[in-house]
Each structure stands twice: as structure tokens, then as C-alpha cells.
Image (tube, rainbow, N blue to C red):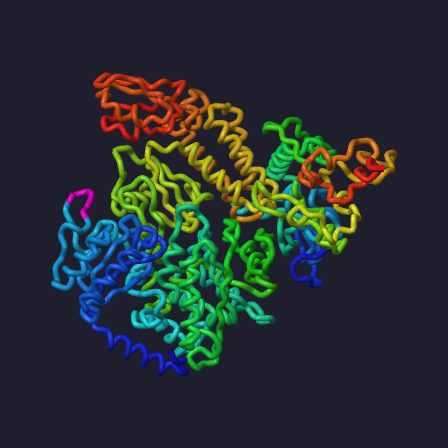
Amino acid sequence: MTHIGNRRDRMVTLSINGLEVSAEEGATLLEVSEFYGFPIPTLCHMEGLSPYGACRLCVVEIGEGPKAKLVSSCTYPAEEGLRVRTASSRVIRARKMILELLLASCPQSKKIQDLASAYEVQQQRFRQEYENCILCGLCTRMCEEQMMAKAIGFRGRGEKRSIGTPFNMQSDVCRLCGACMYVCPACQLRCTYTEPEKAICGGCSNLSPPCLEQEKFDDMMCFMAPCVACEIKKD
Amino acid sequence: MERLKSINEFETLRERLVTDRDPNIPTIVIPAGTCGQASGANDLIRVTKRELLNKKWVDKIHLRITGCNGFCQMEPSVLIEPKRTFYPKVSPKDMIRIVDALANNQVLEDLLYVDPGTGSPIEKQEAIPFFKRQVRTILSRNEKIDPIRITHYIENGGYSAMVKMLTLGKPEWVLEEVKTSGLRGRGGAGFTTGLKWEMLARQPNGHGKALVCNADEGDPGAYMDRSVLEGNPHSIIEGMIIGAYGTGASEGVFYVRNEYPLAIKHLLIALRQARELGVLGERILGTDFSFEIGLVRGAGAFVCGEETALMRSIEGKMGEPCQRPPFPVQKGIDGKPTVINNVETWANIPVIIGSGAEEFAKIGTKRNAGTKIFSLVGKIKNTGLIEVPMGMTIKEIVDEIGGGPATDAKLKAVQTGGPSGGCIPTSLFDLGIDYESLTQVGSIMGSGGLIVMDEKTCMVDVAKYFMNFLKEESCGKCFTCRKGTQRMHEILDDITTGRGTLESLDLLEELATAVKDTTLCGLGQTAPNPVLSTLRYFRNEYLEHIIHRRCPGGVCKELITYSINENCTGCQVCLRNCTVEAITGKKKEIHVIDPTQCIKCGACRSVCKFNAVDVI
């Protein structure tokens, strides 16, 4: 289990959906809930990467009465006496709205489609957009924490926030490992090199080089340079 | 200036400063904060200096350059001490006359402030309605102090609260006093300052503790922190020193946005002077107590006013909020326990310690002690910074201090708490302003912006404006805050351009509630407030936009048409001012606006002297 806050080898008792459970102090509510068999959907959490709390899908309800509130279970630490509800009507309503927002922005992601269908979200009422990135930050954390590269990171804020290399220039520290694409929940061009039968997209073998059609690196989840697809077409 | 080595040396210095000054020498006080300088205070200072030098009156008349006095609308203004004559909107030419008149001990009647209500001139600053109802414990010190001279501050009782505390030598006493005073954080959330300090004092002192002054004031149209930073930086420094003594913190940080160059300049000067004098740094006034303050400039992100984002920004990381718990007081800057307080909170501390907690608690209401500075702007007669006791009603503030509506149009609402605050309708104007009452009616105290709106304001447009601000200023970490504010703006934009449907109104409400529920930090949780509060009190306006495709405020361009009524005298002023030649008509005949040509700029309406242009 990853630990947030000060790690102390103490156990705390809390209740999850009415079940009294004990957990290590400092473990996240998400870990504790999953351990005791209450699954929580998430897009931005991955074991081995630090918790971030960007997608908000993992919200759970804590507290009682007027003080009850929703918190992201992937970042909130297990505390003594906490009363957690992982699937209350307030939680489900919030998750449905998040999924509707996700569908409105990234309808092409298989993972988002599956989650939406699991939560019976059958419509989205916003103006349809086709973005490739939900800015969950899995790729940047993967790059920094597991690949020790820090080749990509967040840029800008608000609606102008994006992921990329500094100044959109080819990164000196990128080793072309492709881990960023491997973890991406929204990416449609997941790179599996030139084995089309294994590929989810098979972009490099089947499609024209994607980078050439769009502004260089912009909007693309691919920071591979030189791009495998481009290289193949050149030969 | 020589470094003071003991408390006695400080007392001697203060006595010398007080006795050296003759309070009867007439002094010209010119407020020259950023607001004053922008409206021409620097010219007045130059003229005054030249006049005094040329006429060799330097010993006869003194000049004091101070921070903002609060009545920003009337700047550049001049105050004459000790008579306390107030001259508003002074031109450099008038300044020469004022200097001459002062030398002859005269008052210039024609330059005095004229009460817009009664039409009669008022001489003394205190008698002006704008100042009359205020209780100025913090702001009143601005006019007595030249912010770049530590001697002025000491002469006016500055650092005496710190000396009182050092003489007593009990940190627990400081905590007890602040707790008894009932002071609550002036940054907006209203957490009891004494409790926060006590938590910090209880934390184990492993790698030191830190104090932060949050001076990242980002609300559009709010500038109370700036005026205190510019006008009285030493009061904040003294507050932090007292806080450090009480809590055992060893370092302090000013987090100031870089858009406040004058505030940064004055702070740096003040910090240097305090260090040189020995009231800050190693072994303060010869005691065992040491405290150092540094300054960090913020790059101007609104979200960096949120405490966790602010700490990350100080650490040199991207300004993004993170999960609490652990709270800053447990694990703050670089892992050190940290207390973050707003500028105004720190400025209140010397007042509490100096004059006693009981005295302080007498002002305001029971659960909301003390005063609060608001920046009062909008469609009223008097605008500027006001300091009022907590619990004063909105009606008193708007009608008595603000002087009522600026034009014939009736007032409709007041927006409090900056972009993530809410709108309060006139029917609730009897509400006493405090932290709880504002939350109850769906708004927040925030840092203290008060924007008064009249009938000619469209509430949907107001919500859209704030949502536009928030969608740009959200850090973008939480998906619901980033996309939610964008989508709310999108729906509001649809409504104001006549594309809204009743379904989209339901969706807007549903989305606003979800954003409020699911975001991480204070910014996201309060971001839907403009939408929710306008929907709560002004739903009719939304419906009017959607069902009748009409904007009652006459603001939303797509939904209004300009026409000329029978008041028209045919003077042709509007015709000449129309940039697209949409107005036709002969002299002395009623003119006509061609709706296909009209770009709805409103120029004709603003130039018409006969109220002949209608907006439907």
C-alpha cells in the first residue's frame, strides 16, 4: 500500500458502508475499500504511482448529517472513526455527472465508455467535443516516478492546461519508453510498435503517420520522436 | 539607524520620536498608494515640495506621503492636519492654492467635499458620510504613517505591542489573548485564528515551524490587502513577530503577487528597516527570541491564494491545491508545520495585543469580533475601501456609507466574496454581514469584495462573467472544476445569446451542484456559487432569457433592440455619434434606428440628453 501522510504502524478502525473495518493509519480510503471488497471506479489512480486526485470519479461520502461531504478516496487518508459510504445516492449522482462530462469531452475512450455503461449513463447533454486527453496525470507521474525521466509535465492552468514537453520541444531526457502511452486511459493511439495483431490501434502499420496531420505534438498523446509510424513510412 | 540592543533602548527611541514631533505644525497628508498615484497624487507631491521649497516654508508646513485612505473615488485627495480638512479630487493648480491657504491658516470653501445628498460642503474628514459610519481600527493608521519610515510607525505606537509581549515573556499569554479576542481569519473561511495558532504551538518543533502572510489577493475589484501592504507594512510584520513568539515559529514568508510592485517595494523597505533597527532577525531587542521573514513573489495565479496551492508555490512547484488532511498546520512548507493567515488578520494582531483582547472583542458581534475591510464598488455614489464592524447590515453599508444608488435606477443586488461569492438581493439587505449569515444566504465572506448592482445589470451576464474568470483561473487539476466551469460558462453563454432551453437550465443546476460536491479545494467548491445564488434569487431573469428571449437588464446584446421614443427632439447628437450610421432622421424630427444596421454598442443611449433611446 502506498502511504500518504506520516507512516505510523498503527491501525485505525473505521466503517465502510456500515461494515466496521480496521486499516493501517495513512492508507488511502480507496485502498482500504478495495481491500474489503468495495470497488471504486477511478481513472487517475494506479498502484505504484503517487495518489493525485484529478479525475474525481473515486469520490466517496464521509461524515454525517449536514457535515457530510464528498472526498476523493484516492487521496483521503483512513482516520479513526471515519464513516465512509462508497455508493450512496449522492456519490452515484456525482459520478454520473462526472461520467457525462467525460463522455462529452472524450467519447472515444473505451475505458470511459465502459464506466459510463456500468453506471447507466446513457446520454450526454453537453456540446460534443473530441479531446484526446482528460489530464489525469498518469503519464506525467509514470514518467517522473517510475521512469525517472520527467520528460513531460503539466503546462498552463484552467482551460489552457495541457501535457507536454517544455516549449513543445523534443525532450532530451525522454527514452522513448512509451510508458506514458501504456498507462493512458483515454489514448486512442496506444503504441504497440509494429505488431498490428497485438495493437489496439495499429496506428503505425495501418494509418498514415498521425503527427503529420496535426500540429507537431499538439493534441497528440504521443511524445515519441522520431515517431515509429513516421520512420516506417519514410522507408 | 543603529541596532537597538534592549527593550529600554527602544523605549528611549520612542520617547525621543514622540517629543521631537510638534503635533501643532500643519501637515499636508497626501495618500499615494497605487490608486492615488494612478489618479495623480505624484503630481501633487511634486507641486507641494516645490512650493514649500520655493517659499521656504519647509519648517512651517510638513508634508507626509502615506498609503491609501480608502476613499479611492475622490483621489487624489489631500488631508490637512491637525485641522483634518479634507480636499477631494485636487488638481496640481488647486494644490498651490491649498499650500498658500494653509500658510495663512485658511480653509478653501470651494474645494471642499460636497455631500451629494444635501449639496452642502463638509470640511472635516470625519464628518463626511463615507467616513462617518466606519470603525477604522486598521485603515485609520494609514494616514498617520509614511510607509517607508519605520520611525513614523514607532511614533504612532508601532512595535509597542511586540515590546509589551517581550516584556511579559509568556508565549501562552499571546495565544490566550488572540483566542479571547475571537479574531477569525480574514481571508474568507473565518477559522478562529487563536485555535489555529494553538495547534501550531502544540506541534513538535522538529525542523522548525513557519508562518505565512497570504498576500495573494486575486479577486477582480478587491484591493483591501494591497492598501494595508502599501500603507502600513510594519503592522503586518509586527503581527507576524507576535505570532512567531506565541507559536514558536522561526521563519516567516510573505507571499505577495508580483502585480503589486509598490506593495513589494514598501515591504522590502520595511523588512530592511526592521532588521537594521533590531526588531526583526536574530535576538530581537536583545532577547533570546529570533525570527526572520522572507518574501516570495507569486506569479499571479488566482488559485495560489488557496493555502495548499500557496505552499506548493512557495516550495517552487506548480500552484495546485492538494488533499487536506494533512493540514498545513501538521505538514506545511517543506514538511514544516505552517500557519497561513491573511494580511488583514496579521494587521489585527498588534491591535489585539496592544489594546487588549477584551477591548477588541467589544467591536462587532458575539461570534464575529472586530472589523472587516470591504472594497465597496459598483452602482453607488461613494466607492472605496471601507472598514466596518462585523454585523453591520448591507443596507447601512450601501445606503449610508455608499450613499445609495448612483443613478435613478433602483438597486437590485449586492455581490459579495469575489468571483466565487454569491449575489444577495435587496430583499435581504437587512442582513448583518458576518461569516455565518453570508454562507446561509448562499454567498461567502471571501476576502471582502462588495459589488453593488442596479436594475441595468443582467444577473445571467454577471454569472457568466465570473464563470469566465473561474474557468481561466481554475488550476485545472480536478476534472470537475476544469470542465465544470467551462461547461457552466458554455450553458450561460447559450442563455445570454438566446440559445438556452429549459432543459439546459436544469442541466446547469445539476452540474453546479456536482461541481460543488466533487472538487478538491475551496476554489472549486465555491466556483458554482455565482450560478447557484443567481438561480436561487433571480431565476425569473433566467426564464425571461430562455422563454421570452429578452434580457430584463438590457445587457445581453443578442436579446435586445434599441429604439427611439417620442422624447426625441431631433437634435441629431445620436446620429452623429453612431459609428455604423444606423440612425436616420431629419433635424427636429423623431429619429429612427435601423435594427439591421445597429451593432448595439449603446453609444446613442449614453449621449442622449432626453432619455429618448429605449432598450427592449
Q: Is residue B310 left or right of residue B556?
A: right
Whether residue B367 is visible, yes or no, is: no
Location of the N terminus of chain A (image quadrant)? bottom right
Tell me the magenta residue range: B114-119
Quarter-wise, where is residue A57 in the image? top right
Tell me which secondary structure the magenta stretch mostly adopts: loop
- B279 part of magenta stretch: no
Closer to the camera, B205 or B496?
B496
Residue sitting at 38 percent across and 50 percent down?
B434
Q: Quadrant of the C terminus of chain A?
A: top right
Which of B34/A82 is in front?
B34
Q: Is residue B115 magenta?
A: yes
Quadrant in which residue B268 is drawn:
bottom left
A93 to A143, vertically: above or below: above
Q: Measured from the top left, where is residue A112 in percent x and y?
A: 70, 35
Count the labels in the image.
Answer: 0
Residue B236, position as x, y percentages in the image: 41, 64
Identity of the residue drawn at 78% across and 46% down: A178
